[in-house]
Image (cartoon, rainbow, N blue to C red):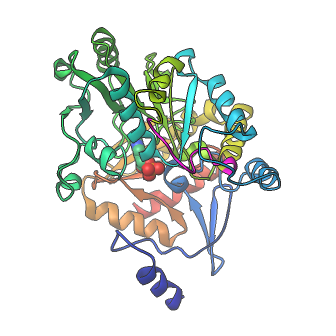
Amino acid sequence: MTTRKNTFLTLQGQTNQSPYLIDVDKAEGIYIWDKTGKRYMDMIAGVAVNNIGHNHPKVVKSIKKQLDKHLHVMVYGEYIQDSQLALAENLASILPKNLSCSYIVNSGTEANEAAIKLAKRYTGRQQIVACKNSYHGSTHGSLSVTGNDEKQSSYKPLLPKVDFIEYNNTASLSIITNKTACVIIETIQGDAGLIKPTQEFITALRETCTVNSVLLIFDEVQVGMGRTGSMFAFEHFNVVPDILTLGKALGGGMPIGAFISSYDIMQSLTHKPMLGHITTFGGHPINCAAANACINVLKEENWIAQANDKGQLLENILIQSTQIKEIRRAGLFLAIDLGSFEKVEKVVKNCLEKGLIGFWFLSTPTAFRLSPPLSISEEELKEAGEIILECL
Ligand SMILES: Cc1ncc(COP(=O)(O)O)c(C=O)c1O
């Protein structure tokens, strides 16, 4: 273990000084096993990725079927490939009509990069509006619209003409004008510690964008694919974006991202100049096969409909602890706010010792996250709740 740990810490590039160091052997359903045989309850689903559980048999089967046919054959968008085509159709079948045209990329941050480029191309405008305390990814463009001074500071200059507004401050929407290309916003803010939009704010945001012909981008990389109790978080608010970005859970455990809009908007990447966004590995056939299987599982199972009740069950157990200041929740995504990082650190580490994985938020040190696979059973939730209560 010491040698493996040293290799991990010295030969694998690191950005975190105190990683979890679980030495993974295998994973299935809501569990991960380490090399000593210790079993962990994965209460974060690889940070909102394994919504249908680890190694779902239908995802594995779909990957194996694709493996036997072909791997990479060409850069994205030149050849017709079964799994890409099926994924485009599958996404269109679960989205509103104006979100029928999907472009498959490699990650959440690339989806956001491309969405911003698309908005600039379509509108011919430059100003971008984003929210304070947001997180949209780690590459330069996405970092430019991530409302976190500390994370941005050592990488400046970033993209120009980005203005940040307060999430849920309707008055701040006045910054959006006919010079704005797009507003990029998490439908529900994740790494800010789970902040939901008010209906007033999100309705006004949609209206302001429509009136000024500004493209509204919803980043659902973290809160999409059933996590909040509907396939997409925007369905809770009766507001539809012009561009939707997805990632994480879409791939059923494989790396993928997508930016999705109308055919008309997407067409603007094809001319003046052509090839407005290109990627070698975007739409990789294996990843698309996995994503297709994942969407099918979410359609077939009743897990999305159960997400809110399951989340409520866990909330009801945890709220008994006097240590908790606040629980913020959307479906089966919970932020447990303890009021101090020291407490969070202690609880998360205790949970890990007891075989339960919780995790931090990027920019909210006073809270920890719980986002287990949607497939988790009530019994497993009760067991998890009891372990966390004990650690609290
Ligand atoms: C809301 C949101 N957008 C974008 C990203 C970036 O996705 P990726 O890590 O796949 O680049 C994340 C990742 O946590 C996210 O939570």
Mainly helix, strand or loop, the magenta region?
loop
**Residue depicted at x 46% and y 16%:** 238
Give percent across and percent down for residue 173: 21, 20
On the image, which quarter does residue 201 sit in? top left
**Nearer to me, 62 or 269:** 269
Q: How many marks?
A: 0
Q: Is residue 143 left or right of residue 2?
A: left
Give percent across and percent down for residue 44: 51, 54
Q: Is residue 282 magenta?
A: yes
Q: Is residue 163 left or right of residue 341?
A: left
Magenta stretch bounds: 276-286
**Residue depicted at x 27% and y 40%:** 145
Residue most extreme to the top: 211
**Residue depicted at x 77% and y 53%:** 70
On the image, which quarter does residue 91 sit in? top right
On the image, which quarter does residue 1 sit in? bottom right
Residue 183, compared with residue 135, is above or below; it is above
Q: Is residue 224 magenta?
A: no
Give percent across and percent down for residue 90: 68, 30
Q: Is residue 227 left or right of residue 338?
A: right
Give percent across and percent down for residue 308: 54, 33
Residue 380, compared with residue 199, is above or below; it is below
- Image quadrant holding the C terminus, namely bottom left
The answer to whether residue 307 shows anywhere in this view is yes
